[in-house]
């Protein structure tokens, strides 16, 4: 069984990955790297001594999610950290925030339920 960690290359995501891997869980990461870098996943691998399957994927893309989830039928659970979270910017760009965070979560739930 694997746990899908969306937004896994971010601040909370990487800390969660370390805990999951050290706890013996298998993980699959999906992140669009809009606010992070694949280097963060390398750092997690170095810290834990375990390899992490990581995809560049956007939770707003049904196609991205379906393809990657079908490639990994062992995914049974998901922790979603894929989000925009800067307070000031969220007031300036509310539509972008609602779209990324709420529509994205609904798309992710749709694909998880379907698969
Ligand atoms: N940082 C904190 O102290 C804190 C505290 C409580 C809750 N949270 C919540 O945890 C979540 C993550 O916060 P964070 O601080 O790790 O932020 P972060 O920006 O470091 O991480 C978010 C990750 O999501 C990715 N991402 C954004 N939109 C995406 C999309 N559409 N598809 C795929 N990936 C996408 C980004 O590239 C980034 O890697 C947020 O919901 C935040 O509100 C954070």
Image (cartoon, rainbow, N blue to C red):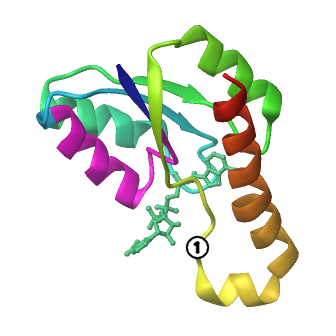
In the rendered view, tell whether residue 70 sits above or below residue 57.
above
Q: Is residue 8 magenta?
A: yes
Q: Quadrant of residue 70?
A: top right
Q: Residue furthest right?
A: 95
Q: Quadrant of the N terminus?
A: top left
**Picture residue at 63% right of the left edge, 66% below the top:** 84
Q: Name the residue: 37% across, 43% down.
A: 40
- Relative height, residue 85 to residue 91 (above, below): above
Give the x, y percent position of residue 80.
Answer: 52, 50
Q: Residue 107, position in %: x, y? A: 76, 44
Residue 75 appears left or right of 86 = left
How crowded pointer 1 is (Cα within 10 Å; few <14, some 14-19, many 20+) is rated as few
16 sits to left or right of 66: left
Q: Is residue 99 above or below residue 22?
A: below
Q: Horizontal and vertical percent for residue 105?
A: 68, 53
Is ligand 1 closer than 8 angstroms to the Cβ of mark 1?
A: yes
Image quadrant in which the C terminus is located: top right
Residue drawn 75% across and 90% down?
91
Total labels drawn: 1
Q: Residue at x 71, y 16 (%)?
A: 67
Q: Position of residue 57 (x, y in %)?
A: 66, 33
17 part of magenta stretch: yes
Task: Kindly report the secondary structure that dominates the magenta region of the rendered protein.
Answer: helix
| Residue receiving disc 1 | 85
The residue tagged with tag 1: helix, strand or loop? Answer: loop
* Residue span colored magenta: 5-21
Q: Quadrant of residue 28?
A: top left
Classify 27 as above or below 37.
Answer: above
């Amino acid at each position: 069984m694997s746990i899908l960690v969306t937004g896994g290359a971010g601040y909370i995501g990487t800390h969660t990955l370390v805990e999951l891997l050290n706890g013996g869980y298998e993980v699959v990461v999906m992140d669009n790297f809009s606010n992070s870098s694949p280097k963060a996943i390398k750092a997690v691998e170095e810290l834990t001594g375990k390899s992490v399957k990581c995809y560049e994927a956007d939770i707003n893309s049904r196609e991205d999610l379906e393809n990657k989830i079908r490639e990994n039928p062992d995914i049974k659970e998901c922790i979603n950290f894929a989000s925009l979270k800067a307070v000031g910017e969220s007031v300036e760009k509310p539509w972008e925030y609602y779209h990324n965070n709420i529509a994205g979560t609904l798309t992710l739930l749709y694909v998880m339920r379907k698969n």
